[in-house]
Image (spheres, rainbow, N blue to C red):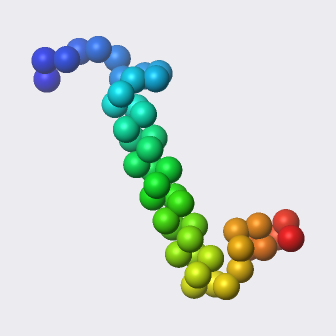
Amino acid sequence: MDNQETKLGFTEFAEAWNGRLAMLGFVIGVITEYVTGQGILSQIGLM
């Protein structure tokens, strides 16, 4: 690895992974709502 810079903070690397994980979480949430028939707030007991 030629690049020895830190990978912390608002770097392109961190933001790319943050976006990927956010998209994954959103898709999992939508699938869970579809399968259970309840919204996310209902599932955790807030509604």
For residue 41, above or below residue 24: below
Which residue is outermost to the top? 5
Q: State which quadrant residue 3 falls in.
A: top left
Task: Say which quadrant the C terminus sits in.
Answer: bottom right
Q: 41 left or right of 18? A: right
Q: Residue 20 at what x, y percent from top left? A: 40, 48
Q: 9 left or right of 4? A: right
Task: Say which quadrant the N terminus sits in.
Answer: top left
For residue 35, above or below residue 26: below
Identity of the residue drawn at 46% across and 55% down: 23
Question: Which one is in front, 27 or 5?
Answer: 27
Identity of the residue drawn at 13% across and 18% down: 2
Which residue is outermost to the left? 2
For residue 23, above or below residue 18: below
For residue 37, above or below residue 23: below
Give the mark count.
0
Q: Residue 31 at what x, y percent from top left? A: 53, 75
Identity of the residue drawn at 57% across and 67% down: 29
Q: 8 left or right of 13? A: right
Identity of the residue drawn at 39% across and 41% down: 17
Q: Residue 26 at what x, y percent from top left? A: 53, 60
Q: 20 left or right of 44? A: left
On the question of residue 44 being in view, the answer is no
On the question of residue 1 being in view, the answer is yes
Q: Residue 35 at what x, y percent from top left? A: 57, 84
